Amino acid sequence: MRVLITGITGFAGSHLAELCLSKKDVELYGMIRWRSRMENIEHIQDRIRLLECDLRDASSTRDVIEEVRPGLIFHLAAQSFVPTSWKAPSESLQTNIIGQLNIFEAVRKLGIDCRIQIACSSEEYGMVYPDEVPIRESNPLRPLSPYGVSKVGQDMLGYQYFMSYGMKIVRTRGFNHTGPRRAPVFVCSDFARQIIDIEKGLKQPVMEVGNLDAKRDFTDVRDMVRAYWLSLEKGTPGSVYNICTGRSYSIREILAKLVEISGVRVDVRTDKGRLRPSDVPLLEGDNSAFRKDTGWEPVIPIEKTLADLLDFWRNCPYRV
Ligand code: GDD
């Protein structure tokens, strides 16, 4: 079976690539851009066919889809950092919505019969009120960032292409996920890297932080990519699924856990540059629909995820 991953050089993409390579009969293809950083997949690169493509360019997207003729597509490529979406809203919408549209149009016009997973996001729920948790898929979408809006756009396009053309699209609304290789702009990885710099004496023992009151539902990336795979193996085309643990922690609690695992002593300082025009206060999901259809459950506890993330930065061969 030919499997194509967009965003294969990214954090989740690289973990999903490892999972795909552990399956029997998978021929793995990945889309890359000419300037993609390769370190996340260096160790498996010789087992993947990498094809150059910019998803914002319809013709290059079509060429790659035509060449690969995939049976499964995992669409992970995106502008995925919420703060960047305020600085570059147009670019974020273009990359996320038009990039996905180009995949759908290529598959449709080439008449390729494949299953497509699209990585939607809990950021789509945005403003969630305390009496709405755990959040179900039917909750209203009230995005609070251009990124959230872009993911609503991807989500709705997925629905519409399923309804209009019967394309076998499964929408996964991934809640926060973290673990080794997470880029250091995201909160757990940022904090873990600061702690390791403090451990190594490279930084004063002061943690720079943003909004510690927000609550998020974190899944280990290795559980998350297992969910992506199962969404196409066992999920129902046309469906939308929350992928989450059902338990949330405040960012303050996450910081405390990282500090406790490391054993460093730190002071905490709020860096105003890390605060957002509006921050989603609470994300805690209900994963029962996905569990029911696929049998998935998250198995890696948050403490192991955070310990592995600290180890990743402790032993990191490169610095981003
Ligand atoms: N990045 C960052 N850095 N966030 C901080 C910091 C900090 O120093 N301090 C506090 N936070 C808070 C943010 O304000 C936010 O409430 C929370 O930590 C998580 O921030 P991120 O790790 O940047 O992730 P996110 O929740 O904005 O978005 C992630 O999850 C989405 C799913 O809900 C990303 O992975 C998205 O791509 C994904 O769709």
Image (cartoon, rainbow, N blue to C red):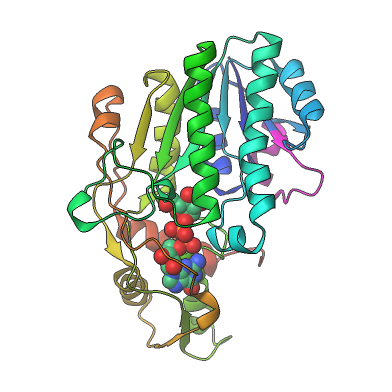
Q: Is residue 252 left or right of residue 221?
A: left
Residue 247 higher or lower than 309, as above or below = above
Q: Is 192 placed above or below 7 here? A: below
Residue 38 drawn at (x, y percent): 71, 48
Q: Position of residue 75 (x, y in %)?
A: 57, 33
Q: Nearer the viewer, residue 115 or 153?
A: 153
Outermost residue, left side: 131
Q: Is residue 38 magenta?
A: yes
All told, the count of numbered labels is 0
Position of residue 149 relative to residue 56, above or below, is below
| Residue 24 visible, this angle | yes
Residue in front for this viewpoint, 30 or 180: 30
Which region is colored magenta? 31-47
Q: In which quadrant of the rendered view does residue 68 lie? A: top right
The quadrant of the picture occupied by the N terminus is top right
Q: Residue at x 75, y 28 (%)?
A: 61
- Report if residue 56 lies within the magenta region: no
Residue at (23, 34) in percent of width and height: 288
Residue 167 horizontal side relative to residue 88, left or right: left
Q: Quadrant of the C terminus?
A: bottom right
Would residue 190 appear left or right of 50 to someone viewing this image?
Answer: left
Residue placed most toward the observer, 319 or 134: 134
Percent x, y for residue 286? 24, 41
State the image quarter where residue 138 is shown: top left
| Vertical placement of residue 206 versus 62, above or below | below
Q: Is residue 311 visible?
A: no
Q: Residue at x 31, y 71 (%)?
A: 257
Q: Position of residue 253 (x, y in %)?
A: 29, 71
